[in-house]
Image (tube, helix red, strand yellow):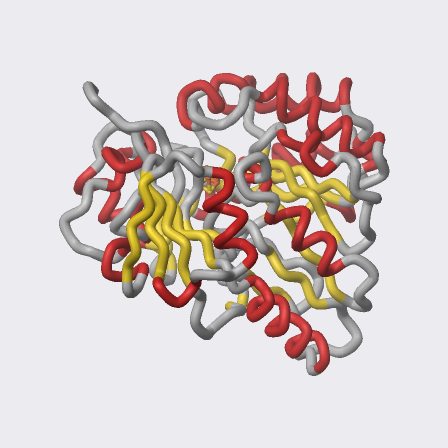
Amino acid sequence: MKNLKPNFSHIYVEKDVVGYPLTDLALSKFSSSSIVMIDHYKDLFNRPGQDFQVQKLSMKLILAKKKEPYLYPASNIIQDYDTPNVFYNTPILNCIYNCDYCYLQGMYNSGNLVVFVNEDDMMDAIDREVSDPRDPSRPTVVSISYNTDLLAMENILPLSRRWINYIDGKRDTILEIRTKSALFGAIKDIEPSENVILSWTLSPEPICAKYESTAPPLKSRVNAIKSALDSGWQVRLCFDPIILIDDWFEIYSLFLKRLFQEINGSHLRDVTLGVFRMNKDYFNRIRKRETRSDIYFSDYAIENGIVVVDSEKRRSSMETLVNILTEFVPKDKILVWKK
Ligand code: SF4
């Protein structure tokens, strides 16, 4: 496609966020970008008729103020983490990567990135929740990289660093930073925090090449994981989504065997796995407008508004993979999505 501008050639700034430290930081990073003042991010981001995929080719940055709610209860699409106190928040909407199976394509009208600069409000909301948890005997877990890949942005905006500094030393509170990035080096100088889980999503090479082509290659992610483990961080590996392509068994078993030759499974905090699944409305929206990926044209069941691999296939594939994984990781550290 001709005449595409580089990412972040334009920064849209809500009038209300002028003067916030993160606004100033972002503007200083993109001093040659065109700045456009706006009233409200939704005027741009939620506008109908936008082309998500075309916008992904030249993403713009929108700096905005998050309004309540600052914290959301975790959806039934994620694994149970042995505590009912599980939440996510949205420091950023959208991701610099563009995986075929990503639900963000169906969730948002726009492929541009929104960064909420009032991080203090989001942090205060966590403090309030932790002071009055649903189950006081269990920790509160907050995923801060839920509708984005926060660590992938670290060289652009050091948000993971700021969140780690905020949470370090707090009682009964854990932040999960889920990523496909290889940018552990950007936070390597920080002392590992017991309050933080660094979670890497990994897939076998053929899946990375076909469905995650904009994310860093598997090898770079594995090197980042090894570095994080060597530095003493708590690391979770996420084999999620497992994509049940025709020869999935051979591909995933070889992948896991090779992976655990490089990574000592007993050093991991835990691993999670789950088959491809997606909110039905997002799925149908993507399928209708985006036909590049065969993922949207396989057979699925619909369960409680979720498009998902049917229960028989999902149970047997998960059992098979758990059996392989238990060669490398203690069984009580394997968390499976199988609702
Ligand atoms: S890395 Fe995650 S959030 Fe980003 S595009 Fe891929 S699936 Fe979506």
Q: Is residue 307 above or below residue 134?
A: above
| Residue 116 seen anywhere in this rendered image of the structure | yes
Q: Nearer the viewer, residue 290 or 277?
A: 290
Q: Is residue 244 above or below residue 124?
A: above
Q: Nearer the viewer, residue 163 or 252?
A: 163
Looking at the rendered image, the quarter that the N terminus falls into is top left
Residue at position x 63%, y 18% from top?
Answer: 219
Quarter location, residue 290: top left
Could you tell me residue 152's position as x and y percent?
A: 55, 36
Q: Is residue 250 above or below residue 200?
A: above
Outermost residue toward the bottom in this view: 132
Quarter location, residue 78: bottom right
Q: Nearer the viewer, residue 191 or 83?
A: 191
Residue at position x 59%, y 40% from top?
Answer: 151
Could you tell me residue 138's position as x and y percent?
A: 76, 70
Q: Is residue 28 above or below residue 170?
A: above
Could you tell me residue 324's position as x and y percent?
A: 69, 29
